Amino acid sequence: MTEARIPLLIDTDPGVDDALALLMAFNDMHHAVVGLTIAAGNVGLEHTVANALKLCEVCGVDVPVYAGAEAPLVFPARDAAYVHGRDGFGDTGYAKASRRADAEHAALAILRLSHEHAGKLVLVALGPLTNLALALKLDPTLPSRLARCVVMGASVTAHGNITPAAEFNIAFDPEAAHIVFSAFPRIELADWEAVLAHGFLHDDAERWLAADSPRARFYAGISAHTRAWAKAGRGARWHAADALAMALALQPEGALELLERPLAVETAGQFARGATIVDWNRQTGAADNVVILMRYDQQRFERMIEAALAATVA
Ligand code: RIB
Ligand code: CA
């Protein structure tokens, strides 16, 4: 008897690295993507929703897409269009998908799907945590129904990417991140510093993008701006943050080193708002709430990316 596929719900702000993570999820035979809930973050919500719908159309997958919050919970935040392009997908001018987003709000979809797949649902958060925080405020029992919660975000020794101390997803909505990391007893965390340790060569990426598949061709187009920006600023290796988090979600057996610790989110501070403070020496007495990915099997990671780009069927 074939094993039932694990239901996967992805909250995302596509975003070029989000798109690679989604391609990996669409190509995984052990998981079934039951929904995409969309956040504002890399670019505005109108673009992130349109990008999610377009990627589903390119991949021929009929996954429901739910629009979420247009802005962070409390304070406005700057986007990452300088990395991903003004439209979040490399400004290629792609023809909009014919399908529209479902009418249900992302926060409500998260709660409904947590009941429909109670005990089995794996939630992967690849963007600012606004939608997840709203869902938690509506129903604080949400964590009890999730099998796993995997987050791309944070910088566990404060080597930030959007400020010196903070990583983008957390810094975009620190109040939301505080709500989420306070509510979940165990979050599997792929932070920015782990991402930097698991870059892959641009030369390899360009070889994978030459695969004869609509997905590779589309992704080559939407990632051109980001790859050029990364090459100019970060050298020979490209870092796709959300792809690493998705590898951890899809194949947790690829994790070679994990550390459990308490983590808290700084929501105040002139220099450190959005910083994620890990109690490495357990000085606070707080309970461990994160499982930090320290090392992942790089070959396994790169094989997943190559296969996702070359895939031709949903
Ligand atoms: O810091 C990297 C994260 O911020 C990734 O999720 C990227 O897509 C952006 O959202
Ligand atoms: Ca993202």
Image (cartoon, rainbow, N blue to C red):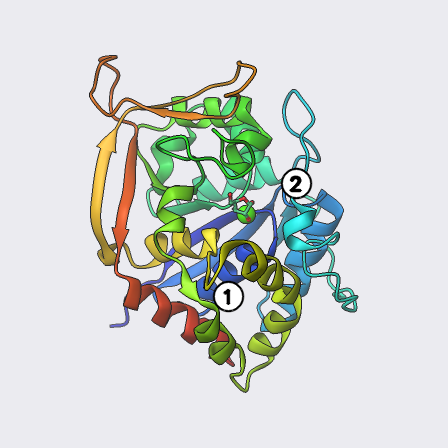
Crowd around label 2: few <14 · some 14–19 · many ≥20 (10 Å):
many
Question: What residue sits right under mark 1 in the picture?
Answer: 23
- In the depicted view, which residue is nearer to us: 235 or 74? 235
For the N terminus, which image quadrant? bottom left
* Residue 146 placement (x, y as % from top left): 37, 39
Report the front residue among 195 and 88.
Answer: 195
- Which quadrant of the structure image shows residue 100? bottom right
Q: Identity of the amino acid at label 2?
A: Ala
Residue 278 x %, y %:
32, 25
Task: Name the quadrant containing residue 204.
Answer: bottom left
Between 157 and 245, which is closer to the camera in this rendering?
157
Q: Earlier in the sequence, mark 1 or mark 2?
A: 1
Residue under numbered circle 2: 40
**Label 1 secondary element:** helix
Q: Residue at x 26, y 60 (%)?
A: 297
Q: Nearer the viewer, residue 16 or 116?
A: 16
**Depicted 137 relative to depicted 54: above or below:** above
With 275 as the anchor, is 30 left or right in this view? left
Residue 212 in picture, x, y percent from top left: 54, 87
Answer whether residue 101 is visible to the viewer in this image: no
Please tell me whether residue 144 is drawn above or below residue 137 in the rendered image.
below
Residue plotted at (56% across, 15% down): 270
Identity, as a three-letter code, of the amino acid under mark 1 = Leu
CB at disc 2 and ligand 1 closer than 8 Å? no
Q: Residue at the location (74% across, 65% down)? A: 97
